[in-house]
Image (tube, rainbow, N blue to C red):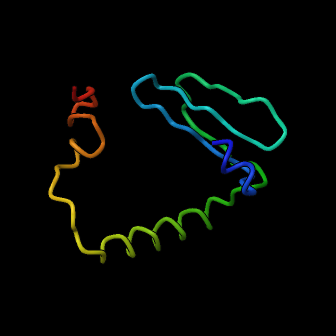
Amino acid sequence: MQEYLISGLRLGWLINPQDQTVEIYRPNQEVEMINLPATLSGNAHLNADQLEQRLTEIALHCSQLPDQDQRSVEEILGYDEAGIDIP
């Protein structure tokens, strides 16, 4: 995450679904760790409407890309459909 901060990132979330934690990264601040968050706020750095629109654009773009990887989603992510690590 430090590389992103050096590159100009203003807000970064590292979400760990297995541990149910989120690490929040901001420039020149200590990493904030939240356990079991119900919601996350981007404060002034993140407008929910803009985020939703941009994520929709990204999803549309990605859906139009050719699938060149024959592995299952579980193999790629390293978790099975129940969220358990695949050894």
Q: Residue furthest right?
A: 28
Viewer-proximal residue, 83 or 74? Answer: 74
Give the residue at x 26% y 26%: 84
Residue 77, how many percent across, how many down? 30, 42
Residue 87, how many percent across, how many down? 22, 26
Note whether 32 is above or below 4 in the view shown. above
| Residue 23 appears left or right of 55 | right
| Residue 28 appears left or right of 62 | right
Viewer-proximal residue, 5 or 34? Answer: 5
| Residue 35 appears left or right of 70 | right
Residue 83, how many percent across, how many down? 28, 31
Residue 51, how many percent across, how many down? 59, 62
Note whether 80 is above or below 55 in the view shown. above
Viewer-proximal residue, 19 or 50? Answer: 19
Give the residue at x 39% y 26%: 18
| Residue 13 appears left or right of 81 | right
> Which of the 4 image quarters holds residue 28?
top right
Give the residue at x 68% y 60%: 47
> Which of the 4 image quarters holds residue 23?
top right
Number of numbered labels in the structure image: 0
| Quarter of the figure that contains the N terminus | top right
> Which of the 4 image quarters holds residue 9?
bottom right
